[in-house]
Image (spheres, rainbow, N blue to C red):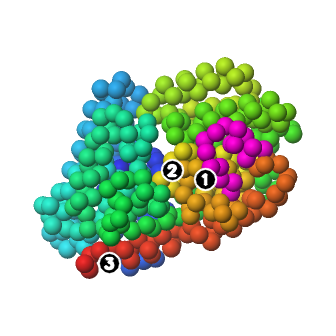
Amino acid sequence: MVSPDAPPDPYGGIGTYLEGLLGAMASQNADVHLVGTSRHRHLPRVSRYGAVTVRRVLATRPWARAARPRWFLGMVAEFARLNLAGVWYAWRLHARARVDLVAVHDWMCAPAGLACAMLLRIPVCYHVHSAETFLGAGSRGLVALLGRALNRALSRRARLIMVPSYGTVAAVPHLAGRGDVVVVSHGAGKAWRMACPDDAERAVIRDKIRSMYGIPDGRRLIVFAGRYAPHKGVAELIDAVKRLVDDGLDVAAVAAGTGWPDLSLNDRLREQVAGLGLGERVHLLCRFLDTDELRDHLVAADACAFPSAYEPFGFVALEAMALGARTVVGPGFDEGVVGGAEGACLRIATMDPGELAAALARAVSDDDPELGARARRYVREHHSWEAAAARTLKAYGEAVGR
């Protein structure tokens, strides 16, 4: 496998996926090697993660807050190193003992996949984790153009294409109608690392989180976690909170995340909060939470809101649901992933702040006391990493046999 992220403690969603998938592969009959970037200098370059051999390419991302030309050059240099390391490692393994398949995660690792398919003649599975470079604001600019070109190029050469949801298939134009595309649903993100608390612990966590933000007793707490990208719906969530307050509902919101790489999004959201007079009601953290912090915020919430216009899968919503949180999701979530039809969450049909406000009002009310319990039960029944690992390896084997 070649990936832009590697466990443990990965940087983003692809790393979260691999952390869960590779952990579950420990019980499977597979010899797995991963080449991926890692931000942890103290870890060895090559080590074992469960039953998997991980080769790390150090990535400190010093360019993350740089001006755009330097940011772009830094990103290109980092991923050039990763792709070269992936091809070199695959070639060495293939020379010693035949590599059956190279799994390439996301378009940033597509050059390694193309080299393995065309030069080393090794079957390649291309994991398309997101259609963001084809949609809305994410489709603009040089990076998106490069992403679409590499996506199409590897899609032509790969023997198997794996996607997390049918919504992703529909959003990527060149995947529709192909017989080599397989949908394999993921597990529930980091939920396996987040123990669901009993009522006593939940009460302690609620008090701790509320005291951090000065939220008084009786005020309902809404929690969001994710990037502040426009399609995530943070601006609409802020407008929805304003509507709820104007309607007399005593609510507050905490939004964990950041607009990185476009940090101007942080400032725009701060201006929106100030302009609406919500300084004491909406807390923009402008940083990501670590796993323990995230778990505590999701547990403390009266409702969790993820009003995305597009989601390739949606780990954080499933993590919230696995903890028994009453969860509202946007129209971008695949119905088959979040189980809205089964009553596991409240799924809005549009990005309209009025519709979102109505769903949040319902979620924080006592009208449906079993909503959180249904959410937890649905995730446990439908999003096991063990099942995802078994289906993934089965699809790999079928592709190798073709």
Element assignment for label 2: loop
Residue at horizontal 23%, vertical 69%?
Answer: 123
**Mark 1 residue element:** helix
Q: Residue at x 41, y 59 (%)?
A: 169
Judged left or right of residue 145, residue 381 is right
Residue receiving disc 2: 311
Image x and y of residue 23, in percent: 47, 66
Residue at 56 percent across and 53 percent down: it is 333
* Among the two numbered marks 2 and 3 on one chain, the one whose residue lies closer to the N terminus: 2
Vertical order, 105 against 310 (above or below): below
Q: For mark 3, what is the residue?
A: 398
Q: Which residue is mark 1?
A: 317
Instruction: Verify whether residue 352 appears in magenta.
Output: yes
Type of amino acid under label 3:
Glu
Residue 226 picture location, percent across and down: 55, 43
- Circle 2/circle 3 CB separation < 8 Å: no
User: Which segment is the magenta one?
Assistant: 345-361
